[in-house]
Image (cartoon, rainbow, N blue to C red):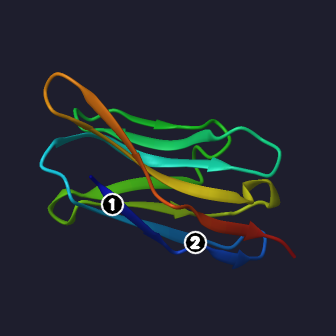
């Protein structure tokens, strides 16, 4: 069972930056993808940024150019650098990881970390 531990959320003013981190442990399966989703109150969970291990990186249109996802494979850690934050970025941010046994994909989620952007 994979454990995903997130850190780095908080309260910031519009235009400021935050960096989220997510450290993974506990599985022998190979990582297929890792990234971040978010869910605002009353909204569905949505993709923010995702790295697929063959090299593809996907960003939501709303964050492209402001957010940067990166990974340290040696540490099994994924990061989300969030710059020029806006009030509409306020949400609970969830770390996500997909692992594969070779024949099946398994999805894992962190517990979520709150990001609030407000003046």
State the residue lying farthest toward the top. Answer: 103
Residue 69 percent across, percent down from the top left: 43, 53
Camera-side residue: 63 or 96? 96
Give the answer, above or below, for where 20 lies relative to 110. below
Q: Earlier in the sequence, mark 1 or mark 2?
A: 1
Give the answer, above or below, for where 18 lies relative to 100. below
**Marking on residue 3:** 1
Residue 49 percent across, percent down from the top left: 49, 44
**Marking on residue 18:** 2
**Secondary structure under the numbered disc 2 in the rendered image:** strand
Residue 27 percent across, percent down from the top left: 18, 52
The crowding category of the residue bearing disc 1, from other C-alpha atoms within 10 Å (few below 14, some 14 to 19, many at least 20), is some
**Marking on residue 114:** none
Residue shown at the point (31%, 35%) measured from the top left:
106
**Secondary structure under the numbered disc 1 in the rendered image:** strand
Q: Quadrant of residue 116?
A: bottom right
Q: CA distance from mark 1 to mark 2?
A: 23 Å
């Amino acid at each position: 069972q994979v454990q995903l531990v997130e850190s780095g959320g908080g309260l910031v003013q519009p235009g400021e930056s935050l960096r989220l981190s997510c450290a993974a442990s506990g599985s022998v399966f190979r990582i297929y993808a890792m990234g971040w989703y978010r869910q605002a109150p009353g909204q569905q969970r949505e993709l923010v940024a995702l790295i697929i291990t063959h090299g593809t990186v996907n960003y939501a249109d709303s964050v492209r150019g402001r957010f940067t996802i990166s990974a340290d494979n040696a540490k099994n850690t994924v990061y989300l650098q969030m710059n020029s934050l806006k009030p509409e970025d306020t949400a609970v941010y969830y770390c996500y990881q997909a692992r594969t046994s070779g024949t099946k994909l398994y999805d894992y989620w962190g517990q979520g970390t709150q990001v609030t952007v407000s003046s």
